[in-house]
Amino acid sequence: MIKFEKVTKQYPDGYVALQEVDLFINKGEFVSIVGRSGAGKSTLLKLIYAEEYPTEGRVFFNDRPIDVIKRWHLPYFRRNIGTIFQDFKLLPKKNVFENISYALEVAGDSNEEIMKKIPKILDIVKITDKALLYPHQLSGGEQQRVSIARALIHNPQVIIADEPTGNLDPVSGWEIVQLLTKINKFGTTVILATHNKSIVDNLKKRVVAIDKGKIIRDQENGRYVI
Amino acid sequence: MKLLKLTRTLKEGFINFRRNGWLSVGTISVLAISLYIVSFTLLIGYTANFVLQNIQEKINITVYFSPEVKQERIMEIKEKLAGFSEIKSVDFVSREQALQELEQLSSRNEIIKEAIQEVGGNPLPDSLVIKANNPDQYEIIAKAIENSVFRDDIININYEQNKKEIENLNKIVNLTKKVGMGLGIIFIFLALLITFNTIRITMYSHKQEFEVKRLVGASNIYVQMPFVFEGIFYGFFSAIISIIFIFITAKYISSLSQKMLGIASLMPFYWSHFWILFGILILLGIMLGVISSFIAIRRYLKV
């Protein structure tokens, strides 16, 4: 479903983030990308949701190369992908409900459709009782759950999580990963970038290790070894 | 669906506009000033044309005859003049009529009344009031009369005085128009700059939101339209404010010209053109707002 074909990414200042990366991720997989800070994990993810483009090589999504997607079509492409980040990226001036509904508004959903979809998603991430609170009134774990809800609202094919537990305590962090696992069980592909050893070891799922821009290990049922 | 997009982005644009608070007030002020200057220039232009037309109709050449000249002679001259193609009408004003008119005009002026009594008898001469078909022809007519056969019968031709007044008025109006245009252009440029800057500031304060919006899959419309609407709001409210001020100015000009130039109130004339001016201002205001937005979007919102 997602394919990296000899992808090299060099930033304008000369820094080479990825070197000749080949990677194949199947539909429905749960993949952890591990590596030190600066190894190239975030860059790898950015290439999937087209925040960056490869300097060499190609990235494919469902067998279609991403770089041919026209600029104005990108928003529609991105609705196939749910993204979650370390800093949650919630809109501070909107409450939980509005943060999630915003994703639906820009897709053109009517107000009725929004009223139907949101309660369901709030239930999945278990944050219904805090629907009218603002991000600054929530704990880190709760904010991340809102992010996940927003990422899920379009029923995306893949969820990309870039260090989602970075700002969370171990317990909350594990809860988030559990949530991702649950989502994965329902068929959504999950790509998780993290440098949290204990999470990776406890997941016992596929682990791709990156170091200095190259993939050094790719194991099913892997452990955090770099 | 399109309507929904429009209303949602309009709402967001309005919220941004309001949230800017004093910044919005400042921006609207500058925009309003430039709109005001432009419409003031237009106002002066319109008014001048109208007033000039008015005055020109009142222009005439009055030929005053010396007291010895008999009325029959004057009538002869009247007939002759009436035959000229350039002359629209010739009216005879007897000295008695002239005195009556003077008394009416001066009914509240004691000094003139006393002067008349002092002089005893009627000091005013007979006159012919000549109107031309075309104001440009007064010059020719006046010269012709000065050089005419009956020039010895004439003691005075008053044409020169009106001419000076008209020339002065023209000069003032042209100067005002030039200055107005010049200032107007400068201020419009300023207004564009300031509105553009304000919108840029709004964009900057929403930087975080852009990132999220793009990630969440917002298309260009959703990202850009709120700012276009913000620009429209700036333009619209500035137009309203400048209209109010122009209205006050118009009233002032009307009463001023009534006093100084002795014409009737200009307000009916202004009212008849009100909607056109209103429309022009609103359009101009909105256009300026939208142009500023587009420039800001072009430069600072990469898709």
Image: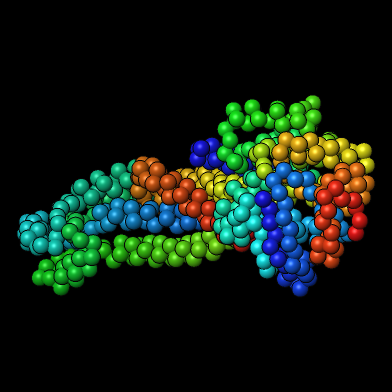
- B119 shown above or below A130: below
Side of B40 where A167 appears, left or right? right
The residue at 57%/52% (across/down) is: A73
- The x, y position of residue B253, in whole percent, is 45, 50
Compare residues A23 and B38 and report the one nearer the observer.
A23
Quick check: can you spot residue B163?
Answer: yes
The residue at 32%/46% (across/down) is: B105
The residue at 7%/60% (across/down) is: B83
- A222 shown above or below B2: below
Q: Give the position of the C terminus of chain B as an image quadrant.
A: bottom right
The residue at 81%/36% (across/down) is: A179
Compare residues A33 and B113 and report the one nearer the observer.
A33
- The x, y position of residue B149, in whole percent, is 10, 70
Compare residues A118 and A138 and report the one nearer the observer.
A118
Coloration mode: rainbow
- The x, y position of residue B223, in whole percent, is 61, 49
- B208 shown above or below B188: above
Side of B148 where A99 appears, left or right? right
Quick check: can you spot residue A84?
Answer: no
Compare residues B264 and A32 and report the one nearer the observer.
A32
Question: Of all residues shown, which one is farthest toward the front?
Answer: A220
Q: How many marks?
A: 0
